[in-house]
Amino acid sequence: MGEEKKLIADLLFDFASSAPGPLVRDASEVVELLRDIGGLAARCAPDIAAFNERFQRFQDGRAAERVADAFFGSPVRGQGQ
């Protein structure tokens, strides 16, 4: 990771310790990892799940619905649905 990107990321959290997979420095490392994409996915699955829970738990396509519910109140189930 370039120093500028590292500086920006480290302002928010320690990216290197929270990244849900290996950090690579060049294309040859990417190619090497992609040779066993299934194994990489299996090894990283728990870290990806933890990362998504920590940083993306509200990224479910329902943000606008939550905003509308918070602003207007939750709709009564069964009415208008």
Image (tube, grey):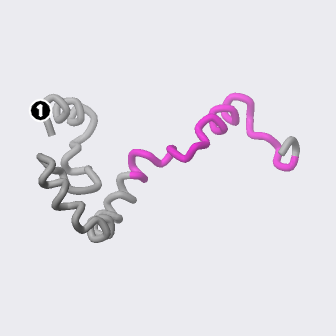
Picture coordinates of residue 57, whole percent (x, y): 48, 48
* Local SS, label 1: helix
Closest to the observer, 71 or 64? 64
Q: Is residue 76 magenta?
A: yes
Image quadrant assignment for residue 22: bottom left
Picture coordinates of residue 10, whole percent (x, y): 20, 36
Q: Is residue 55 magenta?
A: yes
**Residue at point 31%, 69% (across, down):** 38
Closest to the observer, 30 or 63? 30
Q: Is residue 61 left or right of residue 81?
A: left
Picture coordinates of residue 3, whole percent (x, y): 11, 32
Image quadrant assignment for residue 29: bottom left
Q: In this rendering, is residue 31 above or below 60?
A: below
Q: How many marks?
A: 1
Q: Quadrant of the N terminus?
A: top left
Q: Amino acid at mark 1?
A: Glu
**Residue at point 51%, 44% (across, down):** 58
Q: Is residue 16 left or right of residue 38?
A: left
**Residue at point 88%, 44% (across, down):** 79
**Residue at point 70%, 36% (across, down):** 69
Write the start and end of the magenta stretch as one range.
52-78
Which residue is identified by label 1? Answer: 3
